Amino acid sequence: MNKWVLLLLLYLSYLFIWFIVNLVAYFFSLALKRKIIDGLLGIAAVVFYILQSLLGLVLLWWAITTLLSGQFLFFLFLFFFGMSIFSWLSTLLQLPFLAIPGYFSEKFEKLDFVENVVRGEIIDKDSNKVIGVTEGDAAISIKLAKYFLAMYFTQIGFLLVFPTEREGLGWGGWVVKPFIWVITSTLFFGFFYSIFHKIKYKSFFPDDKRYFFIKVWKMSLYIYIPISILLYFFASITGTL
């Protein structure tokens, strides 16, 4: 395979891992009501400036060595065009790593954690009784974050407990594999929940899609955790752990 394709896949892999790390940090920020995501934004900014400075020094040294070696035309090209091109490419490659935490940081800023958790009551038209409550935007997001984190770290716990599940798993796999499991579980259980929702409420999804994920993740945890405990129990008594 072409080395440029491999480099592109490697770049995209790191970008995907960085996205997951930021997503987890964002949900931690919501669950704790503290802007943890800004720490990753700060790290990304520091790394950006360090890499840009190092690149500038390397390009300057390269230009000086070409001049000293008598490659005057190549020196002029580097000085007037090359440095700008390399700097632009470097900035372009690093911008997504800055944009991801920046997006989550801005998203966190838009939430109002001071608002009341309960905005109003849902009244049944026939019985005139309260059948539910409407929650504030921040309250729904916090609930969503807690269920996501429960799903994500349940899978990390599964990897820690069952050695066979982490065989050949690199450091990036510890970040990516739990996330992939959350996605596949959401698709699997979400299919059945959407059918149930269609039958009961005449639509596949709630008006606020976050409730769909909350319900699906809650159902996944209720099923997955007991099964994991049973698997651990049987693996322990059979010596296959």
Image (tube, rainbow, N blue to C red):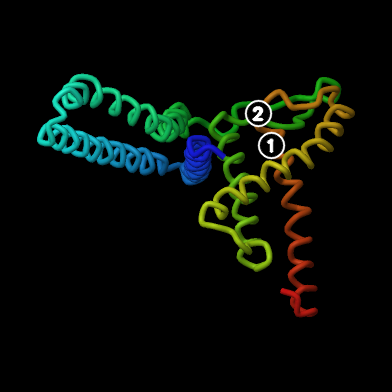
Estimate how packed mark 2 is, as few (under 14), some (14 to 19) or many (20 or more) residues with alpha carbons within 10 Å. Answer: few
Q: Name the mark nearer the viewer: 1 or 2.
A: 1
Question: Residue 78 at what x, y percent from top left?
Answer: 21, 25
Question: Looking at this view, is 215 or 84 the one in front?
Answer: 84
Q: Is residue 47 left or right of residue 170?
A: left
Where is residue 143? Give x, y as percent: 60, 41
Q: Is residue 132 left or right of residue 59?
A: right
In the picture of the structure, the residue carrying the numbered disc 2 is: 134
- Whether residue 26 appears in this view of the structure is no
Can you tell which mark lies on residue 213? 1
Q: Residue placed farthest to the left in the image? A: 68
Q: Which quadrant would the C terminus be assigned to in this image?
A: bottom right
The amino acid sitting under disc 2 is: Thr
Q: Quadrant of residue 236?
A: bottom right
Mark 1 / mark 2, whichever is N-terminal? 2
Q: Residue 126, image x and y in percent?
A: 86, 22
- Camera-side residue: 124 or 8? 8
> As drawn, is 210 to the left or to the right of 43?
right
Nearer to us in this view, 167 or 81: 81
> What secondary structure is marked by label 1?
helix
Residue 25 visible in image: yes
Q: Secondary structure at mark 2?
A: strand
Identity of the amino acid at label 1?
A: Phe
Q: Quadrant of residue 238?
A: bottom right
Q: Position of residue 183 (x, y in %)?
A: 68, 41
Residue at 35%, 27% in the rendered image: 89
Look at the picture and state if 183 lies above or below 122: below
Label 1 CA crowd tier, 10 Å (few <14, some 14–19, many 20+) = many
